[in-house]
Amino acid sequence: MSRRLSYREAVREALREALQQDERVFLMGEDVGHYGGTYAVSKGLLDEFGSERVRDTPLSELGFTAAGIGAALGGMRPIVEVMTVNFSLLALDPIVNTAAMLRHMSGGQFSVPVVIRMATGAGRQVGAQHSNSFEGWYAHVPGLKVLAPATIEDARGMLAPALADPDPVLIFEHAQLYNSEGELPDGAPPVVDIRSAKVRRAGRDVSLITHGGSLPKALRAAEELAALGIAAEVVDLRVLRPLDDATIMASVRKCRRAVVVDEAWRSGSLAAEVMARIMEQAFYELDAPLARVCSEEVPIPYARHLEEAALPQVEKIVAAVRAMMGK
Amino acid sequence: MTSYQVPSPPSGPVPWSKELAHAVLHDLLRIRRMEERCAQLYGEQKIRGFLHLYIGEEAVATGALRALQSEDNVVAAYREHGHALLRGMPMQTIMAEMYGKQEGCSRGHGGSMHLFDAARRFYGGNAIVGGGLPLAVGLALADRMKKRPALTACFFGEGAMAEGVFHEAMNLAALWKLPVLFLCENNLYAMGTALARSEAQTDLCAKATCYGMPALTVDGMDVVAVHAAVQAAAAKVRAGGGPKFLELRTYRFRAHSMFDPELYRDKAEVEAWKTRGPIHTYTARLKDQGLLSEAEFQTLDGRAQAEVEMAVAYAEAGGWEPVSELLRDVYTPAGGGS
């Protein structure tokens, strides 16, 4: 038997389970408590676990993110919620200069078992300063692990291994996914790893390599391509650092063509990194130059038609594949 | 352009036993002799990169660390050799770290600004100005949640108080009434920028009291005053009184780092402060009180210098981390987490 739930509910269940199972775990962030979470993810958890463990913070992204890192050093297992990736730029210093570097620069004396969650992505007409996709920036940094759950299963399953990991783990939840729904089997929560990419749809003609909020778009594009007689394989990166090269290359070697779909801006993007790795590792097995569908190089505009034009869309993915295939 | 006068020399009796008085003097001398040797080794290119000497400011770490307990956490900044040493780290592992040797406390991966000792709860060694402040808040939060009866002592310079993170950390600590002891080492210059050139409000205690946090200014050149103030403040923090703030007024006798030509302050000002040097004024008081003879001073100083030479020999004899180990400790090996 299975049950249907939303991505939001899946994350909430994962949080509840973590809070129930380990007294060192606590959730901290802006409006996680009395407000119930900006995206209503933590709704109800304050009543269940109290204000010490579901801890509202002031609007101090730098201060409370670093305090979460300090609490992790002090033996707790904090889950820091930064409202969105846009505001995480205020906390970039402790995430990069402390959490990511402390183990190395202390000669291995300290691990930093903090989990930092945040919403990412565009598509809701909330304007330039609320629509960034900076997960690729974090994936640049050695010492961090970066996750992008795109399915209900991963939304439910990735938190537990992230908390069990001794190093800092960042989880990016695309804001467009919170309302998405899916099935989970009844009973024990899904066990997922935080190491591997996953093939979400098998194909043989072209690999669509993507993550997060672009996964549903890639899957819809694969549907449309199927109607044109093109069998697209969809690879969900899931883990943006470290990248699972083996799964990426296996798909590329099979399909011999690849399009990378990434909601971040094209220049210096994670898409560029994935393409470079394919060139390094599978160049002679390609039948066509690689392509990518990224956001246009512009702050994400407010007006609906302009925002849509700025972001990767199903039709752009289909067009990129058709151009590559000459169909 | 100092924003306060060179204080008059400390007076009044040193309220300590001869044994304690000598131990404190030895601590002061250990830092001083170690760092004088570091400066020399820097000239010989044995120590490279940045080297921020604490010379002149030793009374702060010496008085403060002696007032802490082993279960307390200590967070320092990048001028932290003295704090590391007096927290109990062996001088030889500090020296080996400055040499970049694998016997160093951080295996030579950290350097002068990144001294750490997990066993002694010494959390660095932070080269981002103000970076330690919210870390201290988090350590204190963890202690509170785990019901550990400990405080977190956080050392930082007055330059850090211009950072936004100072205010965020003060607010969080006060809001949550956490056991943090904020110890501002005010040496008057943020690198080369005098306090009055960088702060609209030069009354540093006012910045703490605006968060409802008790604050006190202390003569940071007087090890006796520092010890008494930190001990009193620590007792209140331990008793659950929430965070406290101390401004410890001190002065850096040497340049900011070894790259600093010191264009921003008068030699006369430096000389005036040197008359208030924390070691010789304390030594004079002890001698006046009959707690110290010149021969005893020489013995303590000789011990400190011998320890330094042993540390240098250890660092010299140390090995280089093999390049094959370059990527170690980026992530925790399987099963190696805390």
Image (tube, coloured by chain):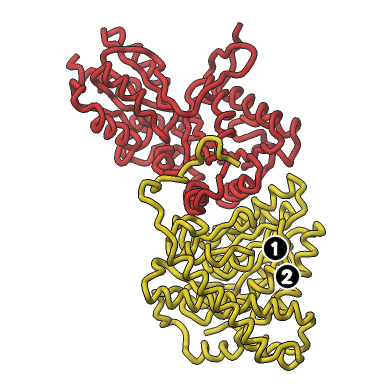
Q: Which residue is mark 2?
A: B230
Q: Disc 2 residue type?
A: Val
Total marks drawn? 2
The dot on residue B181 is 1
Q: Would residue A59 be seen by someone viewing this image from the given angle? A: no
Q: Answer yes or no: are tags 2 and 1 on the same subunit.
A: yes
* Relative image position of residue B6 (x, y in whole percent): 61, 88
Measuring 79% from the left and 80% from the top, which residue is drawn there? B17
Residue nearest the observer in this picture, B4 or A122: B4
Mark carried by residue A292: none
Q: Colour of chain B?
A: yellow
Q: Residue at x 75, y 32 (%)?
A: A47
**Camera-nearest residue between A175 and A229:** A229
Q: Return the chain for callout 2.
A: B
Estimate how packed mark 1 is, as few (under 14), some (14 to 19) or many (20 or more) residues with alpha carbons within 10 Å. many
Q: Earlier in the sequence, mark 2 or mark 1?
A: 1
Amino acid, disc 1: Leu
Residue positioned 53% across, 37% down in the render:
A118
> What chain letter is assigned to the residue under label 1?
B
Q: Residue at x 40, y 23 (%)?
A: A236
Whether residue A67 can be seen here:
yes
Viewport quadrant of the N terminus of chain A: top right
Residue B273 vs residue B63, the one in the foreground: B63
* Residue A203 % position (x, y): 32, 12
Q: Give coordinates of residue A172: x percent, y percent.
A: 49, 34
Q: Residue A198 vs residue B301: left or right?
A: left
Residue B217 location, quadrant: bottom right
Residue A224 relative to residue B75: left or right: left
x, y (%) of residue A141?
A: 42, 44
Which shade of the palette goes to chain A?
A: red
Q: Tell me: B70 left or right of B325.
A: right
Q: Are marks 2 and 1 in contact (CB under 8 Å)?
A: yes
